[in-house]
Image: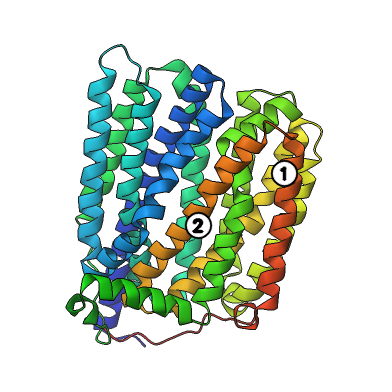
């Protein structure tokens, strides 16, 4: 039986994880809602896929440039303080946007890009901090359930953003949307103040005694030599090449050019996908024990399934077939994401986790940014269906890579006893 002290610790961990969950959903909803409304606004104004894809560049460039710096600082300083400071910066940036919108109600495209880039800079520090906090707030045996809960909540927020965002930008001024976004950031920042990270007896404090550049090199070498984190990072990085076909601009182009639909039909597909992700996230909760035993195999299988589903999406002839394909995408994507995050958190030392997440985000965003721009440019020369066929083949190639790596394929989430 658990003694009174252990019960108190478990209750405290759950409460602080709940605070982290609120921070996560409020921040996710704020960023995605603002991005979706901006993307639709730019596409409506310019009718340019490439200009709309610029929103993706503005969001992915900061993680690419600042990833190593963010990782070191997240591991060096209290992660709670990182959430608070970055949240304050996000509030200030949206406040600037509100002030600028009080003129004629419109912002130049370059100004929009700069504001999105600023929000992304803050999120480059914010996201690794909140993801690295998860294994510090709960026991390792509950990682899969915690990541499933976080992912399901994120997808609900994404679904709300894509479903409501397009309607909002057509119904109310962008300035009023920005007011709602700033309220969400304020809720996240205020909630982060109440998070208390549980300190474990075996926690290492060496990172603070290292120089900044030594910490960068140490983190990079650790990731490069880690038998699980290295192939997992390589796979996810390469996988973001075909991820480039799923930018909002390209999906909108596929909907209008290949399916003869409109922005509403694009929104239905996004809603279908996020609904599938929510169901998949909840499914991961139901199979959490099995997922803990075979995360590597799940990652391999789902990578191959993703490739086949992408080919099916490319061949869809109507909007509703595309919506169904988007929905079916959701569950395997969600289960794979839970497996990847849980495996990374379970196998990487807590003192290195911020750098691992930041480096992963840097590499993924660099590839995603290149792929998004390249495929948007390519859409002017080849059919949009061909682009999605290429994406499906690339997904299958990542599945073959994961299958060929024995450490990743046979990996497990080992249960450890935590000492407080």
Residue depicted at x 49% and y 42% = 158
Query: Split into 4 quadrants, where in the image is the C terminus?
Result: bottom left
Q: CA distance from mark 1 to mark 2?
A: 19 Å
Residue position for label 1: 388
Crowding at dot 2, Cα within 10 Å, few <14 / some 14-19 / many 20+, comes out as many
Name the mark on residue 268: none
Residue 279 seen in the current view: no
The percent position of residue 234, horizontal first and vertical second, equals 55, 68
Secondary structure beneath label 1: helix
Secondary structure beneath label 2: helix
Is 9 in front, or is 134? 134
| Quadrant hosting residue 118 | top left
Residue depicted at x 61% and y 36% = 377
Is 232 in front, or is 186? 232
Q: Earlier in the sequence, mark 1 or mark 2?
A: 2
The percent position of residue 395, horizontal first and vertical second, equals 69, 57
Is 107 placed above or below 367 here? above
The percent position of residue 91, horizontal first and vertical second, equals 24, 39
The percent position of residue 87, horizontal first and vertical second, equals 25, 47
Residue position for label 2: 364
């Amino acid at each position: 039986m658990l003694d009174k002290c252990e019960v108190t610790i478990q209750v405290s961990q759950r409460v602080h994880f709940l605070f982290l969950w609120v921070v996560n959903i409020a921040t996710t909803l704020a960023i995605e809602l603002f991005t979706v409304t901006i993307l639709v606004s730019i596409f409506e104004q310019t009718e340019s896929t490439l200009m709309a894809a610029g929103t993706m560049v503005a969001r992915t460039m900061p993680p690419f440039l600042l990833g190593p710096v963010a990782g070191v600082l997240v591991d060096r300083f209290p992660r709670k303080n990182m959430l608070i400071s970055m949240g304050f910066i996000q509030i200030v940036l949206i406040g600037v946007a509100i002030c600028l919108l009080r003129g004629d109600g419109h912002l130049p495209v370059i100004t929009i890009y700069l504001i999105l880039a600023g929000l992304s800079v803050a999120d480059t520090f914010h996201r690794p901090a909140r993801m690295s906090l998860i294994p510090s707030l709960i026991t390792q045996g509950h990682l899969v359930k915690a990541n499933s809960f976080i992912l399901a909540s994120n997808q609900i927020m994404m679904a709300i953003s894509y479903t409501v965002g397009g309607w909002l930008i057509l119904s109310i001024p962008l300035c009023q949307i920005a007011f709602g976004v700033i309220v969400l950031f304020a809720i996240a920042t205020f909630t982060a103040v109440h998070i208390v990270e549980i300190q474990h007896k075996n926690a290492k404090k060496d990172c603070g005694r290292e120089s900044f550049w030594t910490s960068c090199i140490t983190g990079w070498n650790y990731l490069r030599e880690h038998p699980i984190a290295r192939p997992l990072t390589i796979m996810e990085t390469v996988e973001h090449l075909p991820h480039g076909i799923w930018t909002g601009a390209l999906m909108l182009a596929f909907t209008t050019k290949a399916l003869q639909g409109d922005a509403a039909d694009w929104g239905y597909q996004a809603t279908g996908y996020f609904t599938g992700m929510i169901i998949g996230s909840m499914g991961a909760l139901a199979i959490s024990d099995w997922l803990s035993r075979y995360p590597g195999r799940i990652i391999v299988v789902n990578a191959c399934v993703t490739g086949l589903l992408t080919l099916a999406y490319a061949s869809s002839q109507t909007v509703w077939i595309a919506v169904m394909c988007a929905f079916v995408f959701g569950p395997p994507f969600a289960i794979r994401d839970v497996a990847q995050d849980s495996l990374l958190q379970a196998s990487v030392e807590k003192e290195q986790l911020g750098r691992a997440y930041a480096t992963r985000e840097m590499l993924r965003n660099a590839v995603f940014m290149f792929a998004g721009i390249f495929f948007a440019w390519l859409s002017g020369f080849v059919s949009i269906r061909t682009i999605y066929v290429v994406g499906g083949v690339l997904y299958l190639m990542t599945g073959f890579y994961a299958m060929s790596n024995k450490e990743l394929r046979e990996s497990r989430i080992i249960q450890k006893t935590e000492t407080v």
